[in-house]
Amino acid sequence: MKITESFSLAISNIFSSKMRSFLTMLGIIIGIAAVMVIVGLGNGMEGYITDSFASVGTNVMTVSITGSGSSGTVKEEEMFAIVEENPACFEYISPMVSMRSSVKIGSDTLSYTTATGVGEQYFDIYGYTVAEGRGFRYMDMEKRTRACIVGCYVDQVLFDGQSLGETLRIGGEVFTIVGVLEQIDDEIDEGGSDDAVYIPYSTAARLSYSGTVSSYIVTAVSDDLVDAGQEIIEDALYAILRSSNAYSVTTMAAMLEMMTEMIDLVVLILTVIAGISLVVGGIGIMNIMLVSVSERTREIGIRKALGAKERFILTQFVIEAAVTSAIGGIIGIICGYGLSSVASNVISNMMGETLTVAPSVVSIAVAFGASALIGIVFGFLPARKAARLNPIDALRHD
Amino acid sequence: MKTPLVEFRSVCKTYYMGEDIVRAADNISFSIYENEFVAIVGKSGSGKSTCMNIIGCLDVPTSGTYLLDGRDVGQMDKNELAEIRNEKLGFIFQQYNLLPKMNLLENVEVPLMYAGRPKGERRRIAKEMLEKVGLGDKIRHKPNQLSGGQQQRVSIARALSNSPSVILADEPTGALDSRTSREVLGMLQDLHQQGNTVVLITHDNSIAATAERIIRLADGKVIYDGPTEGAFSDEHMGGTGA
Ligand SMILES: Nc1ncnc2c1ncn2[C@@H]1O[C@H](COP(=O)(O)OP(=O)(O)OP(=O)(O)O)[C@@H](O)[C@H]1O
Ligand SMILES: [Mg+2]
């Protein structure tokens, strides 16, 4: 007796009681669909985050001087020197000083507009271009000028596109707008990337409380050199500060990795939870198969009398369970696919961002394999019960 | 001398019902040769079904030896028993025992399928057998679309499909009216005429009379084994005068 015959027998049995087979499959359908959507969502999120990191650049490192070591703190010149001594590894460096003081135009306080002290290479790092006026120069840093460059929200919304040469106040000091940046975000919004004011870091440092620069942004020449660059900076800072707790160097790649790991973990946990419904589905299959075995006791007896070996009966029932479960799996995959595209649309509409919830080919294959395997595992016990029935008792059964 | 097809040597089958011991087969010995038509008769509880199960390799004796075609069935494992049922035995049951979801053709194919015959050959043989029992025009019907007599004919076709050494019929007319009973019995006689070995199990003397030889059982023992003529005299009826 060929295995294909066991399959066609199983399929004709499944289709002879459609409603019941469908209900048996339901647990598997729900479980597989849930896993598909969760994994799809996870992949979509990961893709979205990777894309947004890619737009920033994964060759970016953030250096924070968190304390002063035994031999004092790090001066800007020392930091610049580290970068300048390794031109093969580093491309740009910019100090970064976040200002606490709010920005005022006339007597209006702007609650969302941020002011940041930056170096002259800052805009190169992020690929921002100056649309009008000029960028920062070495002189601005050196002389601690009261010059500022504004994002296009500030220019267009707050100054009606006529900001060049106008003034605004930060922490009581008056700054003259010398440049306007090109639009960054797709839409200019209050509090977005375009709602920002940049001033020379040296000026910012003097205005800020501590008077020192405690964070820097450094870029490596290429993504491959990020790890090497991180090491160079760490070694140099250790040589200056003599304490490994006084500084930290974070790479975008590491952050991206951290976030992907976090998403992976969440996806894993959710998948395990959804996986439990697969086990429940498996138990449902086992239950129905046990019922089916006792209903078909006489049939089993007849088959045995006609020469069916235990192995044939066992295979027949296991295949029936596996096929039931696998059909459930296929329906679940289709449902999961459908739900995923609905979820894609809903999320995209809600966030205004494109997030593709796409189940991978691998997850489809795994889902199908898992459902068939569940059928085999949970079908085995009822199948063995059927195979071991005593033919005389089975024939007498009604 | 020719080896018997079915040979019982002091076969016993004992059931233990708590304290009670039931000797369903008590030291039974007989031989059935090729191309015989034997009826095993006896009253209810006399041990007919017990014998039939042993002959049919559905059960093994508690003690004694059963040789089928010279092979000791007691020494066989479950797989070998399944094989031997498939190859050597054709069952005809009182309740027909057809598979309700399958059509007649598929039903008759079942033993051939377990024998591993290829699909085309199975189809051809099954069709031939159904034509032989006069149901060639109904091969796509389901069993529940047939009368009892027709269903029993399907079960005869199925029993014949693997050209077995022994055809075992257990009360084959038990569920049929007298006209269809005669029809089925006539069919068994024809099979015997064509050279098959037929074992008919029944409690009904008039049905047993179709056979050429009678083995009468009472309380698990053989009380008569001989030709049909004379099998129904009082002294061979277990002394009941029935
Ligand atoms: N599985 C069993 N367990 C215990 N006792 C049994 C079993 N099977 C049969 N018996 C007993 O063995 C004896 C013979 O039974 P058997 O079924 O062979 O009778 P029978 O001649 O076929 O009767 P009937 O014409 O009613 O079918 C009976 O007393 C019966 O109660
Ligand atoms: Mg009986």
Image (cartoon, rainbow, N blue to C red):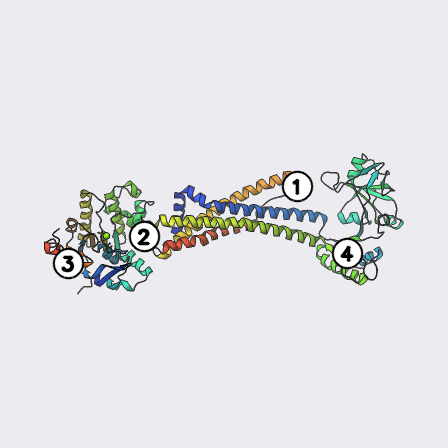
Name the amino acid, label 3: Asp
Q: Nearer the viewer, residue B44 or B60?
A: B44
Residue B59 in percent (x, y) is at 28, 58
> Label 3 marks which chain's residue?
B
- Residue mark closest to the camera, 1 vs 3: 3
Q: Are marks 4 and 2 on the same chain?
A: yes
Question: Is residue A339 in sight in this rendering?
Answer: yes
Asked whether disc 4 touches disc 2, contact meaning CB atoms under 8 Å apart, the reply is no
* A240 to B190, vertically: above or below: below
Give the secondary structure at mark 4: strand
Q: Residue at x 22, y 56 (%)?
A: B47
Q: Which residue is mark 4?
A: A90
Q: Which residue is mark 3?
A: B225
Mark pair 3, 2: CA separation: 31 Å
Mark pair 4, 2: CA separation: 81 Å
Asked whether disc 1 touches disc 3, contact meaning CB atoms under 8 Å apart, the reply is no
- Residue mark closest to the camera, 4 vs 1: 1
User: Is the C-beta of the residue carrying label 4 under 8 Å from the nearest atom of ligand 1?
Assistant: no
Q: Nearer the viewer, residue A175 or B224?
A: B224
Q: Nearer the viewer, residue A68 or B200?
A: A68
